[in-house]
Amino acid sequence: MTTNPEKTVLYIGVTNDLSRRLFEHTENKGNPKTFAGKYYCYNLVYFEHFTHIVFAIEREKQLKKLRREKKDALIDSFNPNWRFLNVDVSE
């Protein structure tokens, strides 16, 4: 899950290369043609790792159905300070 600098919008997606995808989100910031770009969602605050894409897509669908409060609680349990994890992932 990525968020904007103010932490008011969440973006949920699946990728097989998290570092590359975060770079793409950063490059697209301000681009009104993409959700992440339009809402500046390029700061990683939560992620899960899967070995099979089918399970990742299934989980993505589950997360997208959650109310915002549940998403916030999930992020809080993983990253209580909502620290931007982009640097941690690209190392």
Image: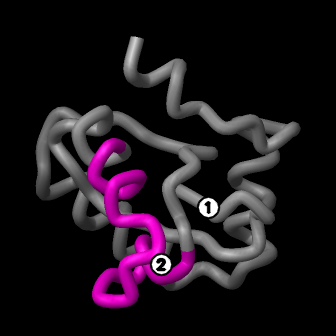
Q: Vertical placement of 14 versus 60: above or below?
A: above
SS for callout 1: strand
Does 25 appear above or below 68? above
Q: Amino acid at mark 2?
A: Lys
Q: Nearer the viewer, residue 55 or 42?
A: 42
Pick the quarter of the image with the C terminus. Answer: top left
Identify the magenta region: 23-39
Residue type marked 1: Thr
Give the number of the disc on residue 22. none
In the image, residue 29 lies at what x, y percent? Answer: 44, 66
Looking at the image, which residue is at 47% across and 82% down?
Answer: 38
Label 2 Cα neighbours within 10 Å, binned few <14 / some 14-19 / many ≥20: some
Distance from disc 2 to disc 1, alpha carbons, whole Å, reads 14 Å
Secondary element type, mark 2 = helix
| Quarter residue 12 falls in | bottom left
The total number of labels drawn is 2
Using residue 31 as the reference point, say whether residue 54 is left or right of it: left
Q: Are marks 2 and 1 in contact (CB under 8 Å)?
A: no
| Foreground of the two, 89 or 5 | 5
Marks 2, 1: nearer the viewer: 1
In this figure, which residue is indicated by the disc labeled 1?
Answer: 3
In the image shown, does 62 or 71 lie closer to the viewer?
71
Expressed as whole percent of the image width and height from the top left, the position of residue 87 reads: 52, 23
Residue 33 placement, left or right of 74: left
Residue at 27% x, 66% y is: 58
| Disc 1 residue crowd, few under 14, some 14–19, many 20+, Cα 10 Å | many
- Is any part of residue 18 visible from this angle? yes
**Above-or-below relation of 36 to 78:** below
- Residue at position x 68%, y 84% in the image: 67
Residue 45 position in % (x across, y down): 62, 45
For residue 64, the mark is 2
